[in-house]
Image (tube, grey):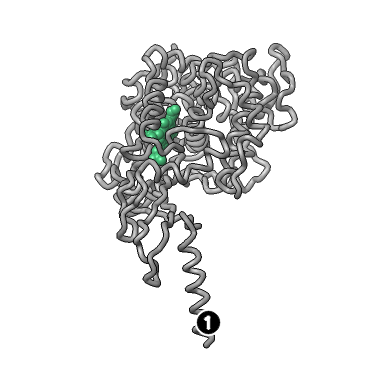
């Protein structure tokens, strides 16, 4: 009797659930096989033997609706209208199609900005002080007062503000100087975007853009005058949110962990930030890199400080050569893909029967192509799959090529994949490394500090950084002292 009652309760509950329109399955199913991931992203995967009744655009737009609610955006990620999406992507392609001269100008702008923010003795508006109370205060150290013995730079703020400023410059042509937009505005916008980004993924109900005074105020400074009422976050989000994350991890990997004994990697990036050409991006510099006395190239400078020059090392059976910037960036995107999962909604047809043989109502599943798993799988990348090694890009296997998809796949492949995004990442990194080595007479030594010393212990050469926790590296400070 009890069994019968229990069965009837379960049957009733199941019938209720299946009759709810478009019931969203609460758990996200992760797909880890690269071929399946590609099918899923394109909307062609058969789930449990059934095709998706949503078209590929609907399938992408549904799991991204929280961005629409939290940021008030309407873009390629949130719209299910193929005509609108095509137009939007076309606009983006135009925005990011920069002439060689514009790359040169952008590189100059990025290096100048990085240097001004890092250079010893000049503390711009105090915004990069670690003390959050200082945000927005007047400059704490005027030029000419003499450099302090120790300077501290809040690393995440530096990376976010620089990425945002350069993205705005590049895609909106906004050449704002200090007077136009104060750095704290920039940082406030970056902070608000990140706060809302995290909240929109975690909180239910999703916080609404209309109610977020902080984000809306920060955005006011950036309201595009000539673009009517279009929300600039439509463009800022896909570019800024991806770029700063990979740059932060890359900075730590190249400057403070695996890159510690590979100065040639940083030298290649610095050289690209100085000469941002296709040739400089793809060429394999001689090993060890030649110092350039005239330009004060990184390799030359570090040699002068008496540090050991890097020597060719053996990795597995391969003799490491000097890596190209392109290979360094590819390896960074493999290890630290900013879009870790690409989600799609799947809806079974109405005639799909449930476990009791009763015709089920439509049900949405959220399936996620696990890009991070594809990029790290030891079966595909070998035992050193979690180690940064740009040399692997000189001998990729077909399986590795298939598994690498930081920019998604057709028909939704990122328009910034071929040129803009990889070079922007290289430029930002090169400018940061250049800025750290800026000559001001004496040399600075840079180290990392953090209130939570356990985080510092986790930064070990050869070990992948922990990107699982949202704000792991938020408290890191760059500390510069005189040699
Ligand atoms: C590190 C940098 C970047 C990464 C890793 C990245 C990643 C991605 C990924 C994974 C997708 C596919 C999303 C999906 O299928 O649901 C995508 C699409 C897209 N990305 Fe990027 N992206 C980057 C930079 C940028 C930049 C700088 C822009 C330009 C402003 C941009 C604009 C777009 C647009 C418009 C789409 C939609 C394409 C379509 O619907 O056909 N991305 N990106």
Quadrant position of residue 69: top right
Q: Position of residue 63 (x, y in %)?
A: 47, 46
In this rendering, position of residue 426 left or right of residue 51: right
Residue sitting at x 27%, y 47%: 399
Residues packed near mark 1 inside 10 Å, few (<14), some (14 to 19) or many (20 plus):
few
Q: Nearer the viewer, residue 92 or 184?
A: 92
The residue where tag 1 is placed is 5
Q: Position of residue 408 (x, y in %)?
A: 37, 40
Q: Describe the element under mark 1 as helix, strand or loop.
A: helix
Farthest residue in the bottom direction? Answer: 1
Residue 329 seen from this side: no
Quadrant for ligand 1?
top left
Q: Where 419 falls versus 53 (above or below)?
A: above
Q: Nearer the viewer, residue 68 or 430?
A: 68
Residue sitting at x 52%, y 33%: 73
Residue sitting at x 29%, y 50%: 35
């Amino acid at each position: 009797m009890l069994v019968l009652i229990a069965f009837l309760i379960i049957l009733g509950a199941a019938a209720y659930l299946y009759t709810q329109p478009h019931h969203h399955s609460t758990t996200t199913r992760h797909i880890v096989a690269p071929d399946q991931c590609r099918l899923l992203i394109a909307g062609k995967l058969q789930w449990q033997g059934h095709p998706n009744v949503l078209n590929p655009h609907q399938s992408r737009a549904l799991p991204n609706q929280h961005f629409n609610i939290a940021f008030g955006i309407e873009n390629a990620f949130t719209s299910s209208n193929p005509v609108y999406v095509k137009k939007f992507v076309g606009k983006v392609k135009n925005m990011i199609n920069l002439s060689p001269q514009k790359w040169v100008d952008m590189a100059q702008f990025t290096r100048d900005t990085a240097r001004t923010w890092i250079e010893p003795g000049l503390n711009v508006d105090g915004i990069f002080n670690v003390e959050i109370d200082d945000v927005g205060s007047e400059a704490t150290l005027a030029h000419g007062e003499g450099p302090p013995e120790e300077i501290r730079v809040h690393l995440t703020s530096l990376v976010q503000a620089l990425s945002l400023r350069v993205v705005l410059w590049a895609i909106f042509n906004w050449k704002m100087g200090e007077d136009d937009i104060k750095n704290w505005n920039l940082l406030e916008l970056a902070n608000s975007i990140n706060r809302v980004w995290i909240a929109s993924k975690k909180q239910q109900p999703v916080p609404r853009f209309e109610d977020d005074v902080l984000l809306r105020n920060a955005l006011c400074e950036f309201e595009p005058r000539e673009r009517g009422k279009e929300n600039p976050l439509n463009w800022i989000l896909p570019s800024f949110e991806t770029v700063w994350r990979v740059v932060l991890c890359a900075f730590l990997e190249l400057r403070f962990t695996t890159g510690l004994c590979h100065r040639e990697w940083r030298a290649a990036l610095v050289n690209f930030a100085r000469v941002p050409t296709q040739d400089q991006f793809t060429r394999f510099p001689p090993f060890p890199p030649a110092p350039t006395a005239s330009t004060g190239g990184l390799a030359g400078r570090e040699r002068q400080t008496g540090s050991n020059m890097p020597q060719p090392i053996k990795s597995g059976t391969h003799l490491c050569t000097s890596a190209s910037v392109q290979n360094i960036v590819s390896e960074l995107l493999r290890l630290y893909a900013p879009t870790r999962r690409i989600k799609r909604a799947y809806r079974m047809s109405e005639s799909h029967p449930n476990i009791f043989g009763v015709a089920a109502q439509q049900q949405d599943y959220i399936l996620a192509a696990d890009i991070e798993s594809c990029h790290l799988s030891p079966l595909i990348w070998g035992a050193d799959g979690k180690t940064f090694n740009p040399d692997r890009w000189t001998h990729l296997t077909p399986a590795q090529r298939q598994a690498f998809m930081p920019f998604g796949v057709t028909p939704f492949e990122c328009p910034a994949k071929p040129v803009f995004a990889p070079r922007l990442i290289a430029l930002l990194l090169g400018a940061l490394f250049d800025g750290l080595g800026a000559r001001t007479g004496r040399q600075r030594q840079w180290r990392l500090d953090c209130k939570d010393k356990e985080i510092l212990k986790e930064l070990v050469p050869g070990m992948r950084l922990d990107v699982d926790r949202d704000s792991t590296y938020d408290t890191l400070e760059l500390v510069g002292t005189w040699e």
